[in-house]
Image: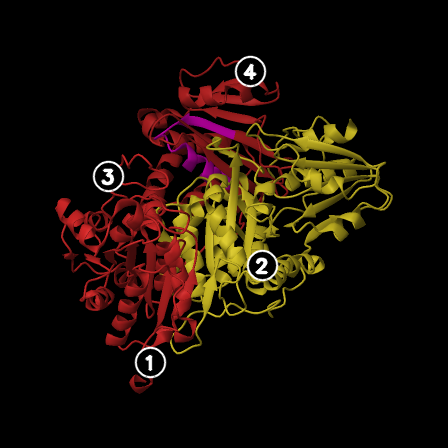
Amino acid sequence: MAENLPDTYIEEGHLPYEFCPGCSHGKILQALSDSLKQQKLDPTEIVLVTDIGCVGLSDKYFITHAFHGLHGRSITYGSGIKMQNPNLHVVVLIGDGGCGIGGHHLLNAARTNTNVNVLVFNNFNFGMTGGQHSVTTPLDSVTATTSMGSTDAPMDIAGTAQVNGGGYIARATAFDKDLPSLITNAMQHDGFALLDIWELCTAYYVVRNDFGRKEMLEYMSSLNMSSGILQKTERPSYQTAYAKIQKKSSENKSMSGLILEPMFESNLKEPVRIILAGAAGQKVVSAGNLIASAAALSGLWTTRRADFPVTIMTGFSVAEVIISPEPVLYSGIPRPDIVALLAPAGRDKIKKRMQEMLSKDVVYFADGLGNVDTEAEQKPLAFPEAAKKDIRKNIAALTAGYLVKELDIFPFGALKEAVRQVQKPKIAEINLKVLTVYE
Amino acid sequence: MNKIYVIHLRHYLSSPPCFYSGCFMNKKKIEIIDGAAAIARGALDAGCDFFAGYPITPASGILGHMLRELPKVGGVGFQGEDEISSIGHCIGAATAGAKAFTASSGPGLSLYSENLGLAIMMEIPLVICISQRLGPSTGAATASAQGDIQFMRWCTSGGYPIIVLSPTNIPECYHITKRAFLLAQRFRCPVFIATDKETVMTTESVSAEEMVKSPDWPDVPEAPIHSSLEPYQKNGRIYHYTGSSHTTEGHITKDPGILAELNDKLRTKIEHNLNELSLVKADTQKDAKTLILSYGVSSRSMEAAVKEIRRKGMKISSLIIYSLWPVPESAIKKSLKGIDKVVIPEMNHGQYRHEIERLVENNVELISVNRVDSFLISPEQILEAING
């Protein structure tokens, strides 16, 4: 294939560039073409990703693949391309404007070390929209939007990528002779590579600030910044690291559902809506799951949902379970038939719904939680004597067992079977032991 | 084991209790599953090989499944730094040949918005699941809602048509997700799965058979409506893709003739195929004068209400709309024949009602049943609305 490689990667039929006279963009594009030639890459294995700004006009001048997207998002597109097909070389061409609006993507791409190569066309202002100030506009500079001089500290793009762990980071100017080899080194590096290439916008920045090549270099030294390679790390790229994850994961089984085969019977005629209301750490949700699974093992249909605060280890924990002889259509429980109160936090959470309950409904309550405002009958959770010493620890399994016995919707064996089939062996062993108090 | 267990609890409805024959009692295998797992499985079975997303309740379950499962099958699952990056990664991956997928909720859709425009303009096949939650901004994190229906439709600048499918239960989550991938490929555009917290996060027992067996829906033809997206690849042809107005070669243009043609194509490829995209479940009764029309989780309460009404010996028709966008106008008009009252339950302030308003005759009464207080619309609420 090598003999078929092009002399230039620039689509010469599209020249001359439509950039302004003296604009440095053409110089950087030539350096890119020279680098691609140095690397002997086939045009079909290269994707140039651009976004908005004058630099976004670049892709049509290349004989490679191209992706032209939204302002500042080019790094995300490029990273996605490289993740899907690591054999492609991705070069992102972005301006200082793009690094502002997409700064979050830039620093996170450096962190993840995603294997894209970012060439920043850094000309200190927005060239395409009239010379407004950008994140790299030098302090006190005049732009269309800072007529009295910019008051903002300029962002150090290379430095930002550097401190966030980017694999290969360099600073350069569009006039540097070694730009092609810097680009080559960046592209050969396995990891995120960024070249912060300083250049001139002759339409706006240069004329408003008397800023030429010489002044640009003086400005760089005034900031105590240097050009050249700033960072090169040997951390593997995201793509290399992820390939290992893929290999390791491939040994694991694919997701499979929890399939239950009904083996018990029930003669339930109508849906029963149960709410277990307790506190974090009581395994309330797990108790709801057991009741629902036992019902499913008895040929009934169930829905269950859990409600708890975002800080899951504190506050209320509520499990809502519907058991029905027919598939459940409406999964809400505005008025429960059965409530089990296990902790004050849960009781308070469902207070209003207990007020909706009718005299035929039942609220079971753990010690000290009775006397709630409801029409429903209130009964203590009268756990068997044998359970009493470890009630606090086993309250969820004990409550599940108690309700199954008390409601008598399906055989107690279904609950034990649910424990065996649904819970992890170690936990199942403990809970089966807890449930023996009912036998 | 053969003992008969009986319980005498009353039905939640104030009407007399119904006595089931017991013939519904399930003897077959069931699966215990939530919507998040069903959607993830649907995506994987559709050949999805790329997912990027950002955590947000109630869609994080899908993110978790996809990030765990994709590397097992050689795919890529990535958590982006935000939703913009996530959908950006999906779009990039799609141009390299991925069947890409992302999932979020309303606040994430806000951030997807600009890239959805790009995906429409670039004609990127992409599936997006939106698990809706209540309210603008952070809203009531996290309560169920259906408030993003119009947002999905009008998610982009320029206002181009989009395809939105909405499942009503867990097996449909699976089958609709698979269908969304087929439509995304065929129409070369983003396809939404509009779901909600209740459907995604509630665990249910469902028929194992229904999870596998395809519903009785028309097949999605494999051939692309216009052309397939040709992925970047070594030794292939050279491809240019752009979010700007472009020639067929992907070069930016402002030629008015080409602009008109391109923009028309983006519209007509969807709007000229309404019949193919139309997906509804009509449950009509001869001589019924009332039609309940719903979608998503609210249709389940509608179905419960329909059962109750018919149990009392009264006539009622219902229509579930799976293909929310483009609006399945013919199917809706067909179900409106002979109807003088339409009841529309939806968990928002009446967003889909607007679409129905323009399809009904003047003498038809429209009744909205709305709820925006974190609770699902109950069957009772629908019954009350019908009885006035």
Q: Which chain is yellow?
A: B
Q: Amino acid at mark 4?
A: Thr
Measure how far apart labels 3 and 1 are at the Cα level.
Answer: 44 Å
**Which is nearer the N-term, disc 3 or disc 4?**
3
**Residue A139 numbered mark, or none:** 3
The residue marked by circle 2 belongs to what chain?
Answer: B
Instruction: Magenta stretch: give its range.
Output: A275-292
Q: Are marks 1 and 2 on the same chain?
A: no
Dot 2: within a 10 Å radius of its alpha carbon, few (fewer than 14), some, or many (20 or more) residues? many
Q: Which chain is red?
A: A
Q: Amino acid at mark 2?
A: Arg
Residue at mark 4:
A374
Closer to us: mark 1 or mark 4? Answer: 1
Residue at mark 1:
A6
Residue at mark 2:
B179
**Which is nearer the N-term, disc 1 or disc 4?**
1
Closer to us: mark 3 or mark 2? Answer: 3
In front of the other: B72 or A162: A162
Measure how far apart labels 1 and 4 are at the Cα level.
Answer: 84 Å
**Residue in the picture at 37% in, 41% down:** A144
**Which is nearer the N-term, disc 3 or disc 1?**
1
Number of numbered markers: 4
In front of the other: A87 or A144: A144
Label 4 SS: loop
Q: Amino acid at mark 1?
A: Pro
Label 1 SS: loop
**Residue in the picture at 40% in, 34% down:** A397
**Residue in the picture at 57% in, 31% down:** A273
Q: Are marks 2 and 4 in contact (CB under 8 Å)?
A: no
- Residue B121, position as x, y percentages in the image: 53, 57
Measure how far apart labels 1 and 2 are at the Cα level.
Answer: 44 Å
